[in-house]
Amino acid sequence: MKGFAMKKIGETGWIEKEIPSIGPNDALVRPTAISPCTSDIHTVWAGAIGDRKDMILGHEAVGIVEAVGSEVKDFKKGDRVVIPAITPDWNSLEAQRGYSMHSGGMLSGWKFSNFKDGVFAEYFHVNDADGNMAILPDTIDDATGVMLCDMMPTGFHGVELADIQFGDKVLVIGIGPVGLMAVAAAAIRGASEIYAVGSRPNCIEIAKEYGATHIINYRNGSIEEQIEKLTDGKGVDKVVIAGGDVDTFATAIQVLKPGGRIGNVNYLGEGDFVKIPRAEWGCGMGHKQIAGGLMPGGRLRMEKLISLIETGRIDPSKLITHRFTGFDKIEEALLLMKDKPKDLIKPVVIIE
Amino acid sequence: MKGFAMKKIGETGWIEKEIPSIGPNDALVRPTAISPCTSDIHTVWAGAIGDRKDMILGHEAVGIVEAVGSEVKDFKKGDRVVIPAITPDWNSLEAQRGYSMHSGGMLSGWKFSNFKDGVFAEYFHVNDADGNMAILPDTIDDATGVMLCDMMPTGFHGVELADIQFGDKVLVIGIGPVGLMAVAAAAIRGASEIYAVGSRPNCIEIAKEYGATHIINYRNGSIEEQIEKLTDGKGVDKVVIAGGDVDTFATAIQVLKPGGRIGNVNYLGEGDFVKIPRAEWGCGMGHKQIAGGLMPGGRLRMEKLISLIETGRIDPSKLITHRFTGFDKIEEALLLMKDKPKDLIKPVVIIE
Amino acid sequence: MKGFAMKKIGETGWIEKEIPSIGPNDALVRPTAISPCTSDIHTVWAGAIGDRKDMILGHEAVGIVEAVGSEVKDFKKGDRVVIPAITPDWNSLEAQRGYSMHSGGMLSGWKFSNFKDGVFAEYFHVNDADGNMAILPDTIDDATGVMLCDMMPTGFHGVELADIQFGDKVLVIGIGPVGLMAVAAAAIRGASEIYAVGSRPNCIEIAKEYGATHIINYRNGSIEEQIEKLTDGKGVDKVVIAGGDVDTFATAIQVLKPGGRIGNVNYLGEGDFVKIPRAEWGCGMGHKQIAGGLMPGGRLRMEKLISLIETGRIDPSKLITHRFTGFDKIEEALLLMKDKPKDLIKPVVIIE
Amino acid sequence: MKGFAMKKIGETGWIEKEIPSIGPNDALVRPTAISPCTSDIHTVWAGAIGDRKDMILGHEAVGIVEAVGSEVKDFKKGDRVVIPAITPDWNSLEAQRGYSMHSGGMLSGWKFSNFKDGVFAEYFHVNDADGNMAILPDTIDDATGVMLCDMMPTGFHGVELADIQFGDKVLVIGIGPVGLMAVAAAAIRGASEIYAVGSRPNCIEIAKEYGATHIINYRNGSIEEQIEKLTDGKGVDKVVIAGGDVDTFATAIQVLKPGGRIGNVNYLGEGDFVKIPRAEWGCGMGHKQIAGGLMPGGRLRMEKLISLIETGRIDPSKLITHRFTGFDKIEEALLLMKDKPKDLIKPVVIIE
């Protein structure tokens, strides 16, 4: 079969591979729509997860089940499914203690285009199919469905990690596709004021549609100053970090109330240390809690988010700014993600 | 001063009393808008809290501060404030363990028209003013503000007790004013499908506007049957009980998934026992958790809910079906609440 | 192979069956020690789970792995293992939402001697072996190890459900083997005063050794009266129910503080309703939370409890009052459990 | 009255001051036993909280009530009481959202020898007496009682922040008096293996008595190496930090499992940043949660901890290595704390 791969750090290209074989618990899926992710860019050009040779890229796809293993009970050939970017081993000790995304080791629930070939291929392999796939209902089109794989669950997890409660004032740092989903999730989680940090016009527009009440644009001063003013010096209840870098946490800590929480879902690709400013962190005594984690994957999560789309609570298709048609357009879509034109939020490739 | 009082069980009337004296931590407030509550009806005509003699009724009011005690730091004469129905003693042991509404004994955070005179008077007394009043901003009118006292926090608390999570399917039993607030709160807490139980046309209309996706009308069969059908036999994730009686819990238990939760905010005025059906409760082993509790009062709660109104996340004024003007209309408004005409949801009396 | 079975309701006996075949995720285990449980008695003589024909009994066993399926990675023939009474399907939706014991339906994580043959046989089948077995270290003997299957995790779960915090005053109703484990768990969870309800001398003795500070004996008056006196009328913070029947909850509710929690781990075999006294429950408003649930099974749970035994935090072997040797003694041990002599807490049969 | 004060940064001495006047909610207390704390040393000689002039030191005391304000209901002259180091304003917004120790601003629940005179005086002032004092029962002597003010609640809070569960393997960094209390608290919270980091012989001895299963001594290699070996490379479930400095967190992050939690109760007096190692923190994705906070104060907390002493769950008097008698010995005890002789854990001065 054909797949679009990382050939080595800094180099991509089309390759030929065997169709993956599946074990008794697995499924083989033929993608019908995929989306490249910033992680793919980091993987190839920043070498973020180390060297990989001829590894097929991609971890966001919806598709049609081609085959299932002998132990798979709930899916069959022909089913239309969505598969999350994170596909845990559900019987692992990590999953049993509530952290399935780290099954088999920290971050190891992330398998596609990390420990095995990804979804930019004619077929791809899904481990623990009963636990890691969900039926995609007819009411949701393929392009929208792909937003379920990573953008929506990651943004929502930021809100969960920050533990947003009714009436909280929330700062969302970064309004790329994940940050926009965090804004939308904060709004349907009960936040009142949502301060969204960003400067690109179409992102700002969508952030407002998703529920941001204020936009923090760097052109108007530092985040700290603007939050200081907007909250009368009281600071925010919670912060979701969906952009920036290791230095972003200093800002988050500074504007956070004692007893507040930071939920980070931004992958920190560089820097030796995340630096927490000692005094603003209350000399270790301020109850400013810091949490950060990979999105939960698995079937239940997909089904829950699907039901939010079906009931109209959220429309993730607003993220899609670029649409391609045809399997061979995967390369173009990925390179677009690399080039990051100003109007790009999220591209999707419809395969059939 | 003049007040509208319960003279004894079954009898109401206007009475004259001394203006309440205030201690160092207290405030004296002059109401500008009030609303009668079903509890007032139960108090007078069902004797729900036992006999009371010449006790001024009412626990929902916004008003103007007339005087504050020597220790009150954050409020002053002339401030426009909202006061929750529940006004805890914040230094009590109960408040320190997170249950301020039970400060001084079970339900004892409820003081107005229970342990002391209520708000249907020219003036009323607020204990621990710094902890129990909140500034009502100009953006919120008096009538809307009165919904903050009891309807909104009680409905929201049902959703908190049920611990609704993203994508949960939720049954809300009862769509009187509290149930309608629970529907709205469930929607902005991340519920997907919301099944609202009721039959009155204007309540149904508003339930849909607040986010109900399905209406369960008793004319179409039992709740159990309808939920069975709507959920393909899987049941709901959570139940909020905002109406019915002691027998309602059997329905809730039956339709609830194992691991689900019931949040009750309905005051159960009659019956010896709430009956939990043994088998449907998994013989005590089903992890169908049952929680029920009085709304949290206090200033923070008011400020949080105010910010939800100000940011447009919720508009509680939809509850108001009847408006009166003039202090002397309190009696009429209360009797309306007793008569419960079909189109009544919530009446408000604007005093000045 | 030979097994001791429920032939039909009210009748037991030895039967011959095929050795269970195992699928790719399963294991076959040869028991080396087993213990009968009160549930076995209810299953046979009260027909608690309905009719079963020639079903091998028993769900508490340690043993030696005889064979594993192709997908089992962490265990091999010859491993000495403990298997919990509850063996969930870890990839089920229920497990993914934190309630693995209800995988596949309420209580359906309980498979042994319920949906499939139990452990009173020469061999038994373990589903999802990697997720449901744990290595039993040499430091723990077989008899002690069997206490890990059900008594210890069930008692501990009562304490988890009641959510005991530092310095809580806790009532434990019932000091059979599960209740005694709840007493021990409450003590190592940070409870201060532990009031244990029981009257049998050896149970009382062990309850004190495990950390009970006061014994509530029915001969000295009602539980309500005694708790009233012991707590100066304030009541208890938490209640664990490990004995009694559907009427026990009324007592628990009455003695519980507002904001308190009941954790039930007693299987309620009879009665139509668990009756919650309305007034004592604060008319539905008292925040007296009611939780009850089947123990969590699985490998992680076993490993956690094993580490508590290994570090000497708890010694569950105190529960064992009767020891038998030889496979054929299973019948005698089970009948002892049925007869319940006064000095019985828990019997164990060492098979080899 | 006489008091022992910080005259300015780097200088202490006896001073004369007016007896504090009390408001309606306050109490005046005459100390009968006090203890100096490392914080007093930091306050004076490191200028940790900035300059203070003639401020009486000390925040750990038990004593006798001398007078109470008009609104104080539960205490009267002559009562023997313990007062926690942290005395919140219980009606503040911070207390209402569960963070009473930050009432009025981050860390501002800490008032003694910070925003007002401390307890090293003939009399001291207690704000919100009903909410911030507790009766010290006759069963607990003065010296033991003083351990309730700061050492015990701070150590226990580390365990709460780390959210220790049954069978967790826990690293406690630092076994000074607070760390020793954390060891004891971890043991009665359900930890199995407790790895205590320290090297002083008497601290090691007491750590073992309190439940440490392993001692990590820097002479045997780095903490990371020793934990690696002790846990077979798996790491620990939770970490309590009760010593070290801003660099200690790197160690904690490295040895922590994904999904684990750090609970810091060490006051970080120096350094610009707490540095979280990016890669070991899972690039922000590892769910290694970081929490740190000032102890909760107030009456309930005191009563809960008192009940743990009374039931013999814990004996904090083991911390007391040096005892002085006489008000004038306060200076000597404080200087001892400054000199930190090898055998010092905690000194107490019995005043009468």
Image: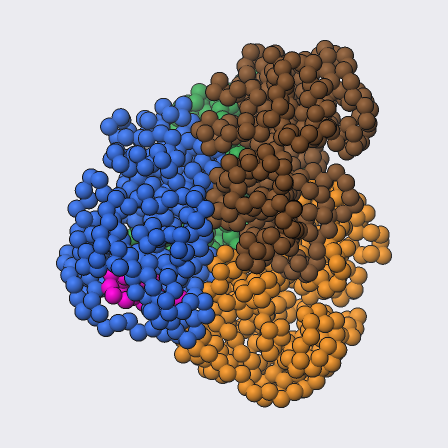
Chain colours: A green, B orange, C brown, D blue
Give the quadrant of residue A146: top right
Instruction: Say which residue appears at 46% left-offset and 32% top-offset.
Output: C313
Tell me: residue C47, above or below residue D88. Answer: above
**On the rendered image, what quadrant is the C terminus of chain B found in?**
bottom right
Tell me: residue D339, above or below residue A256. Answer: above
The percent coordinates of residue D168 (x first, y second) are 46, 34
The percent coordinates of residue C317 (x first, y second) are 54, 27
Q: Is residue D113 visible?
A: no
Instruction: Say which residue appears at 57% left-offset and 32% top-offset.
Output: C152
Q: Which residues are magenta?
A: D108-129
**On the rendered image, what quadrant is the N terminus of chain B found in?**
bottom right
Residue C149 inside the magenta-drawn segment: no
The percent coordinates of residue B15 (x first, y second) are 65, 87
The percent coordinates of residue D271 (x first, y second) are 24, 46
Instruction: Say which residue appears at 29% left-offset and 42% top-offset.
Output: D176
Give the quadrant of residue C6: top right
Asked whether, in this view, residue D55 is left or right of residue A169, the answer is left
Asked whether, in this view, residue B318 is left or right of residue D71, the answer is right
